[in-house]
Amino acid sequence: MELRLALNEVISKSTQALRALNFPAGSDIENAKNIGWLATQGLPGLQILSAEIKASSRTPSRNKIEIETSKDSVQFVSREYSAFYVAQSAVDFAENGKKVVVKNCKFPLLIFAEMGRRQHLPFGFQLEWKSDKEIYKGYSMCGRSALSSTPTALSTATDLTLSATKQLVNFSPVINLAQAHPYDTIGVCVNSPHWKIICAAAKTVLIPDSPRSRSSAGAEVDDSF
């Protein structure tokens, strides 16, 4: 069953769910925006988040990120990282001129979303990874994003590479994502079972309803901002 929701609701609820997984402030909202961006493009952002929630319930501790740097490149090494933990830093490195390599990475579409959201930059990004014996390529530049083919949502990427580019990548995309889904008029399409998992996780960070919580609601809030 599918629902139609406003993008702001998707991002807000995803932020709360990520906060419940102990993502730090800043990282929670940026990851939530990536989830929302994928959803607006018809890609399985909410499925990815629900899978991360399930995985965190089984293995709550996260691996320490190991990075090897050189003059021109950065490599995330050793373990199978979730892109929830590396997407922002990977694209930051690429934005600053480094070639980024991630040996093993779950949910590579989050990195694709992160680079697609940086449409304000005067250059773009190109991404490539291997998964299920197939090579996937993606690019983004000035609000335009495309994939060479549609990957499975829960696939693990190997030998992922990411770099900045000033030229559009020469391949025939499966679809120009920026023009594909008019979410601003019809809302974001949401799979009901995935949404229920996200909402259940988000509930755990809400303050329980009580006379005390109701009496202090809005206290110490500076509305001048």
Image (cartoon, rainbow, N blue to C red):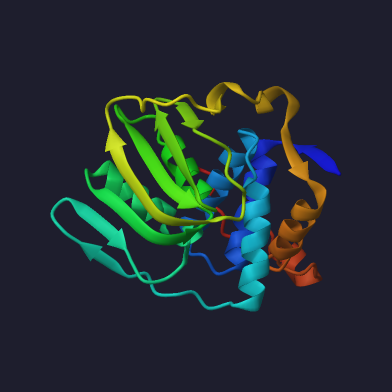
Residue 33, x across and y down, in percent: 54, 45
In the depicted structure, whether residue 188 falls above or below residue 181: below
Residue under the point 73% across and 67% down: 213
Residue under the point 66% across and 61% down: 51
User: Residue 20's quadrant in the figure?
Assistant: bottom right
Q: Is residue 129 visible?
A: yes
Extreme-front residue of the structure: 133
In the depicted structure, whether residue 161 falls above or below residue 205: above
Residue 103, x across and y down, in percent: 37, 61
Quadrant that contains the N terminus: top right
Residue 67, x across and y down, in percent: 29, 66
In the depicted structure, whether residue 44 falls above or below residue 70: above
Residue 91, x across and y down, in percent: 35, 47
User: Residue 64's quadrant in the figure?
Assistant: bottom left
Is 220 placed left or right of 85 in the picture? right
User: Residue 171's quadrant in the figure?
Assistant: top left
Residue under the point 34% across and 45% down: 162
Is 144 placed left or right of 155 in the picture? left
Residue under the point 35% across and 36% down: 125
